[in-house]
Amino acid sequence: MATIETKYLGELRTEAIHVKSEDKVITDAPVDNQGKGEAFSPSDLLTASLGSCMLTIMGITAREQSISIDGTTCSMTKIMASDPRRVSEIQLVFNMPANSFTEKQRTILERAAHTCPVAKSLHPDLLQNVVFNW
């Protein structure tokens, strides 16, 4: 059984439905690629997937270590290359809550972030520039 079903709606827009939950995500081509830019572009979702995956793996690790990372945010910037058109770099800035993390906890959480399946699935030419603000 499929995990996601996606339908082309026309005008460079798609609707992806998560089969199990029926949650929907609309994508739109970006303005710099003939679209309206009125929703996430597919490459925006790639970028969001990386940040969300890293946060999720950090959350699993934090739970196992009895560390709270509640309130952590991640700001992501996607850098496009033109020839061929592709995502060439994703910049991620994690803003950690004002907890008193030990150096060991910081190291554990940072290492965990880099083990996320999305990070490991991306081509090695795609630069993943990750910063943690403690």
Image (cartoon, rainbow, N blue to C red):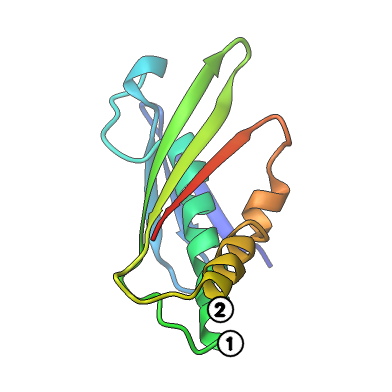
Image quarter (top left, top right, bottom left or bottom right) of the N terminus? bottom right
Q: Above or below — where is 104 with respect to 122?
A: below
Residue at 52%, 46% (x, y): give it: 130
Residue most toward the top? 83
Q: Above or below — where is 58 with respect to 45?
A: below
- The disc at residue 21 is none
Around disc 2, counting alpha carbons within 10 Å, would you say few (fewer than 14), some (14 to 19), or many (20 or more)?
some
| Res 37 seen here | yes
- The disc at residue 64 is 1
**Distance from label 2 to label 1 (Cα)?**
6 Å
Instruction: Identify the amino acid type marked 1.
Output: Glu
Depth order, front residue of 62/9: 62
Is 85 left or right of 32, judged from the image as shown?
Answer: right
Depth order, front residue of 46/19: 46
Residue most toward the front? 103
Q: Position of residue 11 (x, y in %)?
A: 36, 26
Q: Above or below — where is 46 with respect to 20?
A: above
Q: Above or below — where is 64 with respect to 74?
A: below
Q: Secondary structure at mark 1?
A: helix
Residue at 58%, 23% (x, y): give it: 86
Mark 2–mark 1 CB contact (< 8 Å): yes
Q: Position of residue 12 (x, y in %)?
A: 40, 28
Is 42 left or right of 111, judged from the image as shown?
Answer: left
Total numbered circles: 2
Q: Secondary structure at mark 2?
A: helix
Residue linked to disc 2:
60
Depth order, front residue of 4/44: 44
Q: Position of residue 18 (x, y in %)?
A: 49, 63
Instruction: Identify the amino acid type marked 2.
Output: Ile
